[in-house]
Image (cartoon, grey):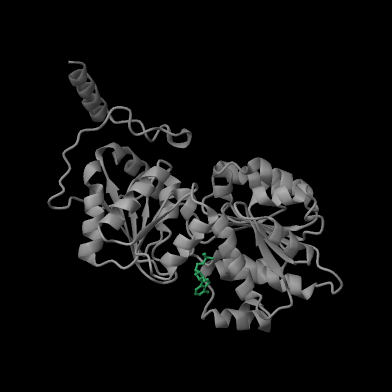
Amino acid sequence: MSFTSLGLIPALLKAVQEQGYTTPSPIQEKTIPIILERKDVLASAQTGTGKTAGFTLPMLQILSQTQKKKYRPIRALILTPTRELAAQVHNNVKEYSAFLNLRSTVIFGGVNAKPQISTIRQGIDVLVATPGRLLDLENQRALSLSRVEILVLDEADRMLDMGFLRDIKKIISLVPSKRQNLLFSATFSKEIKQLAQGILHNPILIEAEPENTTAERVNQKVYRVDKEDKIKVVIQLISEGDWKQVLIFTRTKHRANKLSEKLVKAGISSAAIHGNKSQGARTKALSGFKAQKIRVLVATDIAARGLDIPLLPHVINFELPNIPEDYVHRIGRTGRAGASGEAISLVDVDEIEYIKAIEKLLKESIPSEIIEGFEPTNKPTQGEPKSNNRNRNQQRKPRSQDKNNRQNRNRRRR
Ligand code: AMP
């Protein structure tokens, strides 16, 4: 299959060629012709599948073929959950529209709104936005969504996780009811299906990969370790493996900062990226990492969502996520665009239930090993792991652990 046979116009074929893409990815093969037919799409696709080009290329084609010359209202709106993803999607839009007479811009919070407003005032065809800033500017009448023809919800599951449902509903009320809708989500939860029902009209269902399975190219491994040894293990893995680029996930912002500091002290260049960092600091960390000036990027789930870091060979889960679906997102950072990758999870005794929930979701078990010199000895701590609504059942401790906990409690009382 070639890009030409998908029905793309020469200006887009040229742009794709400039990016070095030779063949469309499976999701692109499926989405491009359907979107060009002006149908609504509900697609399950993770980052790394080429989904952005999958919706952007046909969207740009439709816009350029139906362009009205006189003025430029916002005709396509792409909503993303995070600032980083918005910036990244906009970069793709710019690259793919390089040979078209279309204008685009990106807006998100955490930075001065004035330049964003003045760019929009000059007229743009495509707007990439995070929901909060979009509604802010709409409230100020700095932009109008009344001429939107194509609405894209990218990483819709994450938008719901981040509490954007109300904002999304508000935005839907501001765009014309006659429009084309494209909804992309890494997972198809009940909530996503509900949202899709309220937004999409007779959508074509597209699945890039079977639901909730990990890319086969990712080699997954669990190392059972004690919590207090994790930093030493990370340093050993990076140093002995001579790893050039590593993405490490923590559950909390605090842990991300601490780990990054410790790595720097150990002589390994590192930066942390999370929601408490300013936009400038996040952008700087990400570009430093991409330019290979920084060896380790430590990130929380939300901050890392949708980051485009091509050919990343190693991902470490310093702590497992308490939402099993986040594991799928995390390891989607490796083994991308044809390259193989390795995802290592450092699992302490209190995280055993997390790994079980993840394995249940993946419907496969992840090989577990013990590193010489770091054999785990800890007993489970009382109260861990915290349950969350989605996985309450999965995260109940097995009897033996409950018993251990009881024994620990009794010992403490004594
Ligand atoms: P995405 O899933 O949209 O985040 O894309 C993941 C990565 O794949 C990005 O770095 C894209 O530039 C790249 N990519 C997208 N489509 C193709 C393609 N057809 N061939 C090679 N790389 C691609």
Residue 233: x percent and y percent? 22, 53
Residue pictured at 82% horizontal, 55% vertical: 146
| Any part of residue 36 in sight | no
**Quick check: 402 left or right of 359?**
left
| Any part of residue 333 in sight | yes
Residue 371: x percent and y percent? 17, 52
Question: Quadrant of residue 151 in the image?
Answer: bottom right
For the N terminus, the quadrant is bottom right
**Quick check: 285 left or right of 7?**
left
Residue 68: x percent and y percent? 84, 72
Q: Residue furthest top?
A: 414
Q: How many marks?
A: 0
Residue pictured at 23% horizontal, 24% vertical: 403
Front residue (pair 60, 283): 283
Q: Is residue 11 above or below residue 168?
A: below
Residue 414: x percent and y percent? 17, 15
Question: Quadrant of residue 386 in the image?
Answer: top left
Residue pictured at 36% horizontal, 45% vertical: 255
Front residue (pair 118, 139): 118
Q: Residue furthest left?
A: 373
**Quick check: 295 left or right of 99?**
left
Q: Is residue 412 above or below residue 129?
A: above
